[in-house]
Structure formats: structure tokens, C-alpha cells
Image (tube, rainbow, N blue to C red):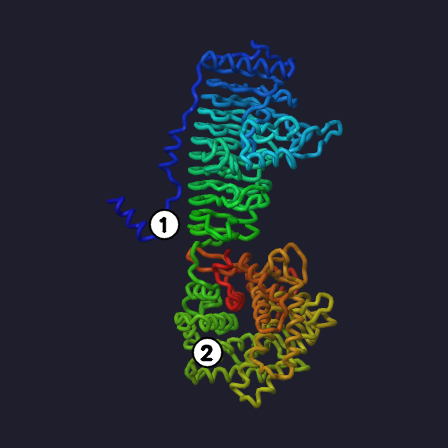
């Protein structure tokens, strides 16, 4: 019955939904199948075979190898390296031998190429005859390297590492060999591509290919336990074409070139546990041959042999190009890799789970599992899949690898550039069914999810990056709809939109609802207009009285909702709305003014002109004039608006910064005002945003043939060109106080949304050139990266919104509002402030007019 239910679920839901995460059954089967090597209870002392602390490396090499040979012929046992530093050359392991390096012992490999005879091995996935690895075995059974001692590969820039192309530190070192790059590496790759037999791929002297530290080739039953390995010439541990491998309690310190920690290649039944990796390359890199020497049907001798059934657990990864890596020599494929309970942390650790390959490789990489991994930081990405690794590699192309069925669960990271990074093919979908569940990546300073090329079934379940939930499927196609519905879900009654506990008449509510209205007009979602109809119905009675509005306050802020009511009345006319509109318009006609004819901001802010106030009053004033006063009389109001904007533009301009100050006091006596100019101290970003939006929306209302229209467009150009100069290059958004460079300043969402809206709409309407359009695109994408987060209920929020900033009035309680930088940054920051939500919706609508949707913006 249970099986039938599972079958029905899989038929009813997509495959990706039915795919399980961690496969515990398979994991336990692999764990059980790994056979440990067995050793007889015999001990062989290397000193009895001629080894000595005073002997030459060649003498010790001969003695230790004799002990290993004798142990194997006797049926196996332990060959013991006692305390002390034992200089030697390459050692060759034999069946049933456990090489024990005791505590206090160091096996030191002397740098003399003559001590490393040529043997059959693989070098970067290519079969060849090369220098013997420091400890080598070929087709042996039950072998081990154990103990609490140290293996010192003697790698340095004056020894083995020199062969990679490094410049020697010592002038006495003579570079005699053809170096790896360019040279031996390219020669070997060409031989493999040409199908040259292994026996003729002879390297070693003057070819520049360094040996591995440990390479067990085609062996069954391997144990590497307890030892510390340092300064390897090349890869540290390289089990090759082998099975039943256990690596445990090993410590690797190796910062040399290509210094991978443990690279099982074309191996099966592998356990790596309780190890520490601090490497100059990948910590663990799983491989299966390169190109012709790896993929099924290739020209090599050992092709089509995947690495499979591998467990990595309880390990610590420090420096390295990747924590657990698959590739790039992965042509034979790879499957059934399980990684769990690991800790990784270093600014020099580039990626956590990395899959790297290209179209020379081929092969299928599948069924890769990672869970319960804790990451402090990594340099690039937590998960990186790259199908274009080494794009300039010389080799036959057209062998397209497939990456599928990758699962990450309960992985956390505190800092990285990207959360997920995928570089796939543009012409085919070879990356699919990639699953991340219950993961949390914070401190991501680049794109949270960066994907190029075609992918399918990227599944995210409770994945949070920078506190934002990452979704596999988006609930809305457009951000304007998504944000509108998010606010409707958060606040079912629009009368309470501005964080209020009672119905409120205010500019914030008006701005946000007007943006929602534009979303409705774009997409005709009746639920939106039904939501919006509540506000005028509840806030304006049959006589046109407005709840919470006081004419005598002469508060410009309270005229801004008039524009929203005006637009609603144009769609759904009501007498009561018309009466309310006339009251608001009358206020503006009677609004107190400065001596040169510019509206005071409020009665309590007498003689003060704020950039905020230009936006609060003039867009409604110009839009309502022809409707309430008639077309013939409207020009009087157009001219009034033009004059007030022009005077404010000139009065608040700061030649030093090229920006516009927040406010001006004509008395020059307010505590926040400069006593000589009357200007406030700084340019608050949102104030400049209000001013720019005011000009833009006034232009919307003015007739196309209005005589001063061109001058307003010129002003708007100047404002936005100046604004763009202060756009943060790294993020594309703006700081709260534009004219102050201070680490306490912060990137702020409301102003950034305003600027993005003005730039995008202004460019669409032909007011701006392409440079400002590009700045708008950068700004909008920056807003998505910096400020927009997805919540657990799949709503979205606009974060880091400055709640409020003002100037005065002059009373003890408000003296802190002095226009200083310290004041501006002291005001609270919150999410979903309507002063930012409205402009964000408008900016989103502009992006949607350009053809951008949610899915495209998240690629």
C-alpha cells in the first residue's frame, strides 16, 4: 500500500518534487561494503635491513624497500619507521604490508630524481610513465600507511615545485628540466589525444611532471591513517583505479602548486573521515580520467571507469581551491558521493562543493549528496557547477558532460561572493535536478544565485541567502505584482499601510496606493482594485470630509494623497471624492509662501522650503488644475509650479557637491540652517529623490506644448546626472547621505528606489540618454541584490528603509533634528516603508515595460 501511495505521488507531482534528499539506505550500503585491509601480527624493523639515521637517502631507500619486500613474502605484517628523520627515495608498497610511521618519526624524501624510478601512473588524469610517486603501489592487495609520524615530501620552490614553472628562490638552483607549463603537460595531453600507447608516453627526466606523494594504482584494500603529510611535490594522496579505500585521521599541510589533498580517481568504495586539509589546491578532488583516457569509448587503456560510492565525513577543510571537488579530470563519470558533518573556513578556500568539467570531458556526474556542513567563509561560491572549466583547453570537443541529482542539505555559510554559481551550456540543458534544502548562506556580497546557460529543475526548499528565501518557482511573473500582493497580504486594510494603528490620511499611504493602482492598470488584477477602493470609501464621507485631514495645518504632506484620490475618481467618479479634491486644491491655492512665492512646507515650518514638499504638492497641483479649474485657467497653475520648482532648484543647489540640499530657511535663523545661506547642512538622498520624482510627475501632467517643458527636462537631467555621480559603483545603489563619505553611512532603499524609478521612466520617455538608462538598470538590479528579500511566506520585503528624517521644529524635543550627518544616520531603519515600496513598484513597472520579468532578473 505504501509503495502504491508513493507511485501515485510521483505520478501526480513533478519528478523533482518526488526526488528524495539524502539517501540513507544507499549511504549505509556503501559504508558496509567498504572492506578494510587485514594484516598479520608481524613486525619488521627497517634497521635490521640496513636503514640508519646516518645512511644516505639511497641506502635507506634500499633498506626500507627490502623490509617491505620481506614482509610481503612472509605473508604480511608491519614495517616500522621508528622515531627520527629518515632520508629516503621512492618506496614501493607490496601486498599485505602496513607501513607504520611511528610518533616522532619523519619519512623525509630527498630531492634527487635518480631516486624516483619511472613507473606507470596517471598525471592529471592522463596515463603515462613518470617519476615514481614517493610511496607507490601497483596492483597490490591490502596495503596501508599508518602511524602518528610525518611524511615530508620536501617540496619547495627550490626542489619539486620548481618544475611547475616557478622561479627558484635560490640562485644556486639550476633549472634543467622542461617545465610543466608550458612543456610536459601539453606533450602528454597531445599523446593522449593521439592515442599513443602508455608504454610510449615516457616522461621523467627533463619533462617536468612532478610525482604524487602517495599513489596506489589498481589496488584493493587501502588504509591511510593517522599520519601528517607536508610539502608534497604534487597531489598528496592519489588512489587510482582502486577500491576499498579508507583515509582517516590524516592531516595534510601542503601549499604547493597543484597540491590537492586527496584525489580518488576511478575508485569505488571510498571512506575519507576525520581528516584535516590545508592545501594549495583542492582539499578533496574526485576524478575519473581526462578526455580520451577517461570517457567511455576513448582511446586510453582504462576508460569508462567512474568514481563511485564515496563517503566523506567529519573533515576540516581550510585553505584550498575547493572543499569537495568533482573534476576536472572526470571523463569517466562519478556517482554516489556522500559528504557530511564537515567544517570549512578560510578566506583562501574558494568553494565548498565544486563540480568542474568541460566539453572535452564527457561523462555523467550524478547522485552527489552533501549535508550538515558548517562554513565560516569561502572566497567564491558555496556551490559551483562549471561546465566551461579551462575553456581554452586543446582537445576534441563535443563531449558534453551531464550534471544531475545534486543535493545539499543543512549547509550554512557566513560569507561568500555567491551562494550558488552555475556556468552551464547555452545550447543544451545538461545541468538539472539540483536541490538545496534547509541551507542558510549569509554575507553573500555578490549575486545570491548566479546562473548562466540552460538549467532545469533548480529546486530550493527553505534556502535562505542573506535572510531572503530563494525560490525555485516564483509566485508572480513581475516584481510590481509580487510587491503589491505582498503588501496586501501583510496589511489587509490599506488605511493602515503606514505602520499605523488607526486609519491614517497621509502621503505615504497615498504614494503606495498610487503605485499599486498602476500595477492594477498594467495587469488588471481585480483583487488589487478591490483592495484600493477601501481607502476612499473609508476615509472620505459623503460630504467630502477627510478623516485626519486639517486644512488649517497647511501641511503639504497631506495634499499628496490627493493625486491618488484624483486618479481613483477618474476611474470611479463620486461626488464626495470631487468635494475632497476641491478642498485639497484650495489648500494649495492658499498655502503660505516665502517672499519669492514658494510654498512653506507646513504651517509649523514657516518660511521653510523642503525638497520633500515639492513632491507632496506640485504633481497633484498640475494634474488637478485642468480638471478642477478648466483647461483655460490651468496655465496659471502650470506657470506657478514651474516658477516654484525653478526657484527651489536654484536656491537649494550646492555648487561644491553638485547636489541639492534638503531644505532652505528664508529667515536664516533656524538652528539647522546656515546663517549666511539658510541652507541645511547636507544632501539627504531621499530629499533629492523627492525632488527628482516631483519634476518627473509634473512633466507627466503638463501639456506637451507647454512653453517651459524643455527647461524642466533640462533641470531633471541635471539632477539625475549629478545623482548618478554618487551611485555606489559596487552595488549600483545610493547611500543615505549623498555628500558624506563615512563608514557609518549606509546603503538605503527608499532613495535608491526613487532614483531607479526616475532614471528608467525618464529614459523611456526620451528625457535622458542611454547612459542614464544604464545607470537605472544597474540601480534596479542593485536594489534586488541589496534590499529585496523573500520571506518564508513567499512575500517579498524592501529592507533597509530609512523611517524618517526631518529638520526641527525648534523645540527641545526636536532639536536633535539638526540636519547633521550624525542626525540622519541616527533615525530608525525598517522594512517595507511605503516611501520606498511605492517607488520600487514604479521602478519595477518600468523594468517590465523593458521586457524584464522576475525569472529573468534572477538568472
As measured in the structure, the alpha-carbon distance from the residue carrying label 1 to the one carrying label 2 is: 47 Å
Q: Is residue 358 at least partly visible in the picture? A: no
Q: Is residue 631 above or below residue 173?
A: below
Question: Which of the pair 788/497 is nearer the observer?
Answer: 788
* Residue 488 shown left or right of residue 255 in the figure: left
Q: Is residue 685 above or below residue 707?
A: above
The residue under label 1 is: 15
Closer to the eye: label 1 or 2: 1
Q: Measuring 38% from the left and 49% from the top, which residue is drawn there?
A: 16
Q: Secondary structure at mark 2?
A: helix
> Which quarter of the figure has residue 36?
top left
Counting residues from the start of the chain, the first of labels 1 and 2 encountered is 1
Residue 577: percent from the left, percent from the top?
45, 82
Q: Secondary structure at mark 1?
A: helix
Q: Is residue 612 at least partly visible in the picture? A: yes
Q: Is residue 604 above or below residue 447?
A: below
Q: Quadrant of the N terminus?
A: top left
Question: Which of the pair 410/357 is nearer the observer?
Answer: 357
* Residue 429 shown left or right of residue 20 in the figure: right
Number of other residues with Cα within 10 Å of mark 1, as a class: few under 14, some 14 to 19, many 20 or more: few
Number of other residues with Cα within 10 Å of mark 2, as a class: few under 14, some 14 to 19, many 20 or more: some
Residue 677: percent from the left, percent from the top?
73, 72
Q: Residue furthest right?
A: 171
User: What count of labels does the image hold?
Assistant: 2
Q: Marks 2 and 1: in contact by CB < 8 Å?
A: no
Residue 402: percent from the left, percent from the top?
46, 45
Q: Residue furthest left?
A: 1
Residue 568's disc number: 2
Question: Which of the pair 137/787 is nearer the observer?
Answer: 137
Q: Residue furthest top?
A: 48
Amino acid at each position: 500500500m505504501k509503495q502504491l501511495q508513493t507511485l501515485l505521488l510521483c505520478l501526480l507531482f513533478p519528478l523533482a518534487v518526488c526526488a528524495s534528499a539524502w539517501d540513507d539506505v544507499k549511504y549505509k550500503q556503501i559504508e558496509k561494503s567498504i572492506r578494510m585491509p587485514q594484516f598479520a601480527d608481524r613486525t619488521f624493523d627497517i634497521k635490521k635491513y640496513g636503514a640508519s639515521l646516518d645512511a644516505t637517502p639511497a641506502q635507506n631507500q634500499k633498506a626500507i624497500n627490502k623490509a617491505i619486500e620481506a614482509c610481503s613474502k612472509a605473508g604480511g605484517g608491519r614495517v616500522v619507521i621508528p622515531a627520527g628523520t629518515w632520508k629516503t627515495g621512492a618506496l614501493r608498497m607490496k601486498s599485505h604490508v602496513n607501513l607504520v610511521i611511528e610518533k616522532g618519526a619523519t619519512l623525509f624524501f630527498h630531492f634527487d630524481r635518480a631516486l624516483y624510478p619511472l613507473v606507470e601512473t596517471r598525471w592529471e588524469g592522463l596515463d603515462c610513465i613518470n617519476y615514481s610517486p614517493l610511496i607507490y603501489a601497483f596492483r597490490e592487495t591490502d596495503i596501508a600507511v599508518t602511524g602518528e609520524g610525518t611524511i615530508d615530501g620536501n617540496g619547495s620552490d627550490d626542489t619539486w615545485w620548481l618544475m611547475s614553472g616557478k622561479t627558484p628562490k635560490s640562485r644556486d638552483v639550476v633549472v634543467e628540466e622542461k617545465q610543466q607549463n608550458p612543456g610536459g603537460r601539453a606533450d602528454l595531453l597531445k599523446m593522449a589525444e593521439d592515442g599513443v600507447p602508455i608504454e610510449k608516453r615516457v616522461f621523467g627526466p627533463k619533462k617536468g611532471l612532478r610525482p604524487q606523494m602517495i599513489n596506489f594504482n589498481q589496488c584493493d584494500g587501502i588504509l591511510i591513517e593517522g599520519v601528517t603529510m607536508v610539502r608534497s611535490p604534487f597531489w598528496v594522496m592519489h588512489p587510482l583505479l582502486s577500491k576499498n579505500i579508507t583515509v582517516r585521521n590524516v592531516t595534510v599541510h601542503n601549499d604547493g602548486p597543484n597540491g590537492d589533498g586527496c584525489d580518488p580517481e576511478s575508485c569505488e568504495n571510498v571512506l575519507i573521515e576525520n581528516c584535516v586539509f590545508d592545501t594549495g589546491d583542492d582539499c578533496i578532488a574526485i576524478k575519473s580520467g581526462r578526455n580520451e583516457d577517461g570517457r567511455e569509448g576513448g582511446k586510453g587503456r582504462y576508460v569508462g571507469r567512474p568514481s563511485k560510492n564515496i563517503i566523506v565525513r567529519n573533515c576540516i577543510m581550510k585553505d584550498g581551491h575547493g572543499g569537495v571537488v568533482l573534476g576536472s579530470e572526470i571523463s569517466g563519470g562519478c556517482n554516489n558521493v556522500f559528504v557530511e558533518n564537515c567544517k570549512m573556513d578560510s578566506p583562501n578556500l574558494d568553494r565548498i562543493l565544486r563540480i568542474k568539467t568541460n566539453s572535452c570531458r564527457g561523462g555523467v556526474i550524478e547522485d552527489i549528496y552533501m549535508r550538515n556542513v558548517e562554513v565560516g567563509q569561502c572566497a567564491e561560491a558555496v556551490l559551483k557547477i562549471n561546465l566551461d572549466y579551462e575553456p581554452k583547453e586543446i582537445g576534441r570537443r563535443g563531449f558534453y558532460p551531464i550534471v544531475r541529482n545534486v543535493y545539499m542539505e543543512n549547509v550554512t555559510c557566513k560569507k561568500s561572493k555567491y551562494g550558488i554559481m552555475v556556468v552551464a551550456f547555452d545550447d543544451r540543458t545538461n545541468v538539472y535536478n539540483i536541490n538545496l534544502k534547509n541551507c542558510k548562506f549569509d554575507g553573500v556580497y555578490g549575486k545570491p544565485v548566479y546562473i548562466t546557460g540552460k538549467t532545469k529543475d533548480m529546486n530550493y526548499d527553505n534556502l535562505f541567502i542573506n535572510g531572503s528565501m530563494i525560490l525555485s518557482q516564483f509566485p508572480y511573473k513581475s516584481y510590481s505584482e509580487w510587491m503589491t500582493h505582498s503588501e496586501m497580504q501583510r496589511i489587509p486594510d490599506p488605511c493602515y499601510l503606514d505602520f499605523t494603528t488607526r486609519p491614517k490620511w497621509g502621503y505615504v499611504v497615498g504614494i503606495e496606493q498610487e503605485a499599486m493602482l498602476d500595477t492594477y492598470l498594467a495587469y488588471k488584477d481585480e483583487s488589487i482594485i478591490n483592495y484600493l477602493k477601501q481607502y476612499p470609501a473609508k476615509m472620505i464621507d459623503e460630504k467630502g470630509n477627510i478623516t485626519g485631514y486639517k486644512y488649517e495645518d497647511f501641511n503639504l504632506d497631506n495634499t499628496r494623497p490627493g493625486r491618488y484620490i484624483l486618479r481613483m475618481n477618474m476611474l470611479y467618479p463620486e461626488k464626495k471624492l470631487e468635494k475632497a479634491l476641491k478642498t485639497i486644491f484650495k489648500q494649495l491655492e492658499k498655502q503660505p509662501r516665502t517672499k519669492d512665492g514658494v510654498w512653506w512646507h507646513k504651517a509649523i515650518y514657516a518660511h521653510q522650503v523642503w525638497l520633500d514638499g515639492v513632491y507632496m504638492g506640485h504633481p497633484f497641483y498640475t494634474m488637478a488644475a485642468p480638471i478642477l479649474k478648466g483647461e483655460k485657467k490651468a496655465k496659471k497653475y502650470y506657470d506657478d509650479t514651474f516658477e516654484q520648482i525653478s526657484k527651489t532648484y536654484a536656491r537649494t543647489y550646492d555648487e561644491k557637491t553638485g547636489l541639492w540640499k534638503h531644505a532652505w530657511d528664508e529667515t536664516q535663523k533656524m538652528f539647522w540652517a546656515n546663517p549666511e545661506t539658510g541652507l541645511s547642512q547636507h544632501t539627504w538622498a531621499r530629499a533629492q529623490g523627492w525632488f527628482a520624482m516631483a519634476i518627473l510627475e509634473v512633466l507627466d501632467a503638463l501639456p506637451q506644448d507647454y512653453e517651459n517643458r524643455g527647461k524642466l527636462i533640462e533641470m531633471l537631467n541635471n539632477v539625475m546626472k549629478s545623482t548618478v555621480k554618487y551611485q555606489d559603483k559596487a552595488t549600483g545603489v545610493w547611500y543615505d547621505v549623498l555628500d558624506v563619505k563615512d563608514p557609518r553611512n549606509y546603503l538605503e532603499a527608499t532613495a535608491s528606489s526613487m532614483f531607479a524609478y526616475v532614471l528608467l521612466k525618464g529614459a523611456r520617455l526620451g528625457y535622458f540618454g542611454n547612459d542614464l538608462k544604464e545607470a537605472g538598470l544597474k540601480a534596479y538590479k542593485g536594489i534586488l541584490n541589496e534590499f529585496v528579500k523573500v520571506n518564508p511566506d513567499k512575500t517579498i520585503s524592501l529592507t533597509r528603509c530609512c523611517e524618517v528624517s526631518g529638520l526641527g521644529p525648534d523645540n527641545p524635543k526636536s532639536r536633535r533634528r539638526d540636519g547633521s550627518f550624525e542626525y540622519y544616520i541616527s533615525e530608525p531603519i525598517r522594512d517595507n516603508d511605503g516611501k520606498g515600496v511605492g517607488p520600487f513598484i514604479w521602478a519595477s513597472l518600468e523594468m517590465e515595460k523593458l521586457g524584464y520579468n522576475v525569472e529573468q532578473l534572477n538568472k
